[in-house]
Image (tube, rainbow, N blue to C red):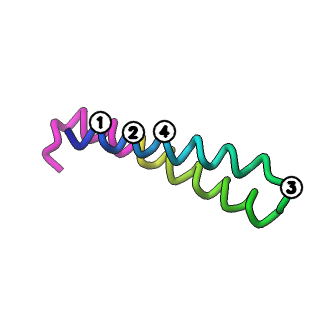
Amino acid sequence: MGELTEKVKGNVNEAIGNVKQESGNPETRAEGREQEAKGEAQQFKGEVEGKLGNDI
């Protein structure tokens, strides 16, 4: 179950990050890049959990 949860969280963070990157505010764009990277990391964590059978 952790795998799915992390992947969903990752997708949400990536989507929000992409929207923030469209902002005219440089600070908001920077937050968007950070949030997108966080989402990518969460998706990777979910993939690893899935391959290890949630044993981590």
Sooner in the amino-acid sequence: mark 4 or mark 1: 1
Between the C-alphas of marks 3 and 4, the distance is: 23 Å
**Mark 1 and mark 4 in contact (Cβ < 8 Å)?**
no
* 27 in relation to 22, above or below: below
Extreme right residue here?
A: 24
Depth check, mark 3 against mark 4: the one in front is 3
Image quarter of residue 8: top left
**Mark 1 and mark 2 in contact (Cβ < 8 Å)?**
yes
Q: In what element is the residue under mark 3?
A: loop
Task: Give the extent of the magenta segment.
Answer: 44-56
Between the C-alphas of marks 2 and 3, the distance is: 27 Å
Q: Callout 3: 10 Å neighbours few (<14), some, many (20+)?
A: few
Residue picked out by circle 1: 4
Between the C-alphas of marks 4 and 1, the distance is: 11 Å
Disc 3 marks which amino acid?
Gly
Residue picked out by circle 3: 24
Magenta stretch encompasses residue 50: yes
Sooner in the amino-acid sequence: mark 1 or mark 3: 1
**Mark 4 and mark 2 in contact (Cβ < 8 Å)?**
yes
**Mark 4 and mark 3 in contact (Cβ < 8 Å)?**
no
Depth check, mark 1 against mark 3: the one in front is 3
Locate residue 3, reporting x and y percent: 27, 38
- The residue lying at 74 percent from left, 61 percent from top is 28
Locate residue 50, reporting x and y percent: 24, 34
Q: In what element is the residue under mark 4?
A: helix
Locate residue 40, reporting x and y percent: 50, 44
Residue picked out by circle 4: 11
